[in-house]
Every structure is written in C-alpha cells, then in structure tokens.
Image: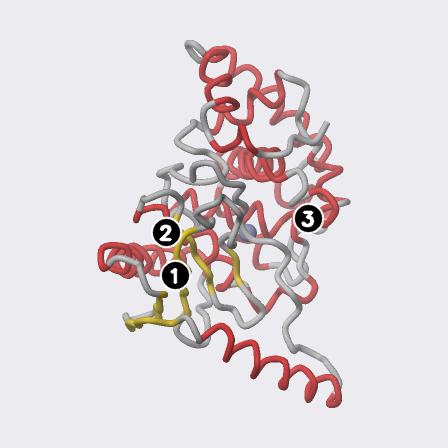
Amino acid sequence: MKATIRSRTPETPRSLGHACALFATIWLLITTSTVADAAEPEQGSLETTHLHISWVDGVSAEAVNLVATSGEEFYEEIAELLGDEPPRKIRVLLQGPAETPDHKQRGYPHVDSFAQIHLYQYGNSDSSYISALAHEMVHVFRFNRNQNADWFFEEGFAELIALTVDPSLRGFPWYDTPIVIAAGQWLESEQALPMEQLQKEHKALNLPCKAQAYSLRSAFFHYLADTYGLQNMLKMAEEESAGSLDQYSRYFGKSLKELEAEWQTWTRRQFVATPEHEEKGRRYRTQTPIQYMHICP
Ligand SMILES: [Zn+2]
C-alpha cells in the first residue's frame, strides 16, 4: 500500500435504473465506448464459479490465483450473510500497479457503473490485490441499491462485512493496525470526524477525509455489530432505504448521536488500556501510508 493514497470505493455512479428512453440511448452509446476502452488492456481472463477475472499484462499468475481462490471464499461467506446474490458472475479487473514509476496515482480499488470491480497492486505485493476485494464485493452484492443508497451506511456496512469474512486488516485504512489503535488515536488526538456529520455530509467528506472517514466509520460499525449483534445490522441492511436515522433507534435502541458517544467512550477506554498505545498510534500515523494522506482538521 506504500507511498500512495488509496481509497476504497468512491460513490458509485447511478445505474441505468429509471432513466428515460432518450437518456438510455445516450447512456448505451457511452456504455459501448467505455466497455471497449476498459477491455483494451485485457491480457488474460479466467472464470471461476462466481467470478470472471481479467488482468492486464504484467499481473502474475500468483496474483490471479490468489484473487480466484480468495474471491470464491469471500463470495461464499458474503452470500451466506447477505442472502441475495448478484444476477451474474462478478467481473474483477486486475489493473496492475496503483501508481506509475514516478509515483503518480493510476487508480484505486472501486466498483464502476457496470458493477465491475477494479483492483490495483500496491508495491510488489500480490496479496495487495485482495486487500479491498471483499469490501468491493459487498458493494456488488448490493449494487441494485446504488440509486438511493445512504453511502455512510453502505461504506460502513461493506467494511464490516469485509472484516467479518477477511479479518486480516492488511490494507487501507488499517495497514495491519488493530481497529482500536487506528480509531483511538484519532479520538485522542482530537482529529475524529464526527459520525453524525459524516452521515449528513457523506459525499463532501468521505473521500477528502478518507483516512479518518474509513477507519472511524468502520470502527463504529464494528462496535455496533459487536455490541448489539451482527444480526441486527444485517436486518437493518435489508431495509429498502438502509441507513436512515430512525433505523439506528429501531435496531440499536439509541439515536446515532447517542451510539456515537457510547462508542467513543468505549474506544478511548480500550485505546488507553492497550500497552504502548501511544507508540502504536504514532506508528500508524508516521510509518503506514496514512502518513501521505490529507488529514481533515
Ligand atoms: Zn466502499
């Protein structure tokens, strides 16, 4: 993950959905050219039971195998948790290095408007291709919700499910740092992004403040599932407009503001009770790729 700024999924563009016929025609023209562009660098492809994986020149066989085997494992577990499965095989594109040799960013893991997952390599690590795979797969499982989705909830939920099926903490925003250290150090340094504000202004804050947004929101959702039960979170996720404010009270018995206060108190307590927490927090900020990211005041 190295010297590059990396983020999970930006807001996924709206799908064709309820567009009018004229718009649909224009959209299809755009679609055709975009698909052709996207397909151009394809150098190989492999189909597994639930995935259609393709890759650009230079991607190793080990990376492809890792994505195939881990992807199938993640798929089975996500399907078991979420129920509804995508209507067709998930397309996964392995796009090569996340940055150019002169350190310009080429891309970041995301799901495009055709429900295709794009993954990138960080440094020389083949395993970096799968660090965002489970998270992006959750977005594909819930792709038909994109049009009216509450993205604070969708991102928090995707990361919660990703951590459930792949608890490795290997990629962004953790970089092998325990959740309570990553979240606790933002709180203790008074740089925590308020969850209430992130929920309200998600589009404006999520990517610009991604270091704080992704780690804190994920830690918060993890706490909710741990404290109030994963089943409650899964039920909330089934709601047609999952993530509306009234649902927090309904499923967890308290308002979002109250839940946030409770989670912060718990996290601070856990953080300061962790041996060498200050040193661990400092390492997260100065020795992982977090050091290169913009920190919102
Ligand atoms: Zn995402």
* Residue matched to label 2: 129
Report helix, strand or loop for mark 3.
helix
> Sequence-wise, which precedes: disc 1 or disc 2?
1
- Depicted 23 relative to depicted 197: above or below: below
Query: Residue shown at 30%/49% (left/top)?
Result: 126
Q: Residues within 10 Å of mark 1 (few under 14, many from 20)?
A: many
Residue 275 locus on image (x, y percent): 41, 10
Residue 247 disc label: 3
Mark 1 vs mark 3: which is more N-terminal?
A: 1
Are dots 1 and 2 in contact, CB under 8 Å?
yes
Do residues under tags 3 and 2 come within 8 Å of each other at their CB atoms? no
> Which of the pair 273/23 is nearer the observer?
23
Q: Residue 35: horizontal and vertical position, in percent?
A: 52, 78
**Label 2 neighbourhood size at 10 Å, few (<14), some (14-19), many (20+)?**
many
Q: Residue at x 49, y 47 (%)?
A: 231
Q: Which residue is mark 1?
A: 94
The earlier-in-sequence mark between 3 and 2 is: 2
